[in-house]
Image: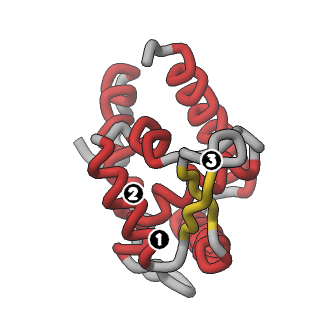
Amino acid sequence: MTKHEPMTADELLDAVGPAFGRLRRSSLLEVEDPISQKDLTRTLVLRIVQDAEREDAGEVTVGAVAQHLGVDPSVASRMVSDCIAAGYLVRAASQRDGRRTVLHLGPDGRELMARFTRHQRAAFESITVDWTEHERLEFARLMLKYVDSQDALRDRLPR
């Protein structure tokens, strides 16, 4: 089946999963101020910390990173340690429990995330250059709705 042939509803819905798999690769498009593969991976961790800080969702620990990414705590620990060594994250004592260590974005982490946001926007605009403004905005709205629904589902699942 070519990209231009009409798809049945089942074919269209079956194609969504593989399409999501291809999305991450497209974020490496050569656009202005590209992000390295290593920093692209680091943004997974940084986004969790950034979102928690932005939403005032409480303190982020290595365990929370592991849970959010669905990885083993040792994997999350290595990812966090890499972000700290790169200067993107800072460890601090919890204000609620001084025995716990929490994570905060450092200045370089904030700058990387700002660059990453610009990179993602440029990639989106490059990919959708031949779309109408209505198509772009509708896709963006539906993507955000999808992610919100996914987050709501995650919150309802037993931990």
Residue drawn at (64%, 48%) of the image: 94
The picture quadrant where one finds residue 159 is top left
Crowd around label 1: few <14 · some 14–19 · many ≥20 (10 Å)? some
Q: Residue furthest front?
A: 99
Residue drawn at (71%, 39%) of the image: 57
Question: Is residue 143 toward the left or the right of residue 96 in the image?
Answer: left
| CA distance separating discs 3 and 2 | 38 Å
Q: Tell me, yes or no, if residue 122 can be seen here.
A: no
Crowd around label 3: few <14 · some 14–19 · many ≥20 (10 Å)? few
Residue linked to disc 1: 84
- Amino acid marked by disc 2: Arg
Q: Residue furthest left?
A: 1
Q: Earlier in the sequence, mark 3 or mark 2?
A: 2
Give the quarter of the figure containing the N terminus: top left
- Amino acid marked by disc 3: Gly
- Residue 98 image label: 3
Q: Nearer the viewer, mark 1 or mark 2?
A: 1
Crowd around label 2: few <14 · some 14–19 · many ≥20 (10 Å)? few
Of the pair 59 and 8, the residue shown nearer to us = 59
Query: What secondary structure is found at the residue carrying circle 1?
Result: helix
- Compared with residue 13, is residue 132 higher up or lower down, i.e. above or below? below
- Residue 24 image label: 2
Query: What secondary structure is found at the residue carrying circle 2?
Result: helix
Q: Position of residue 29 (x, y in %)?
A: 43, 74
Q: Position of residue 85 (x, y in %)?
A: 42, 76
Question: Is residue 100 toward the left or the right of residue 68 in the image?
Answer: right
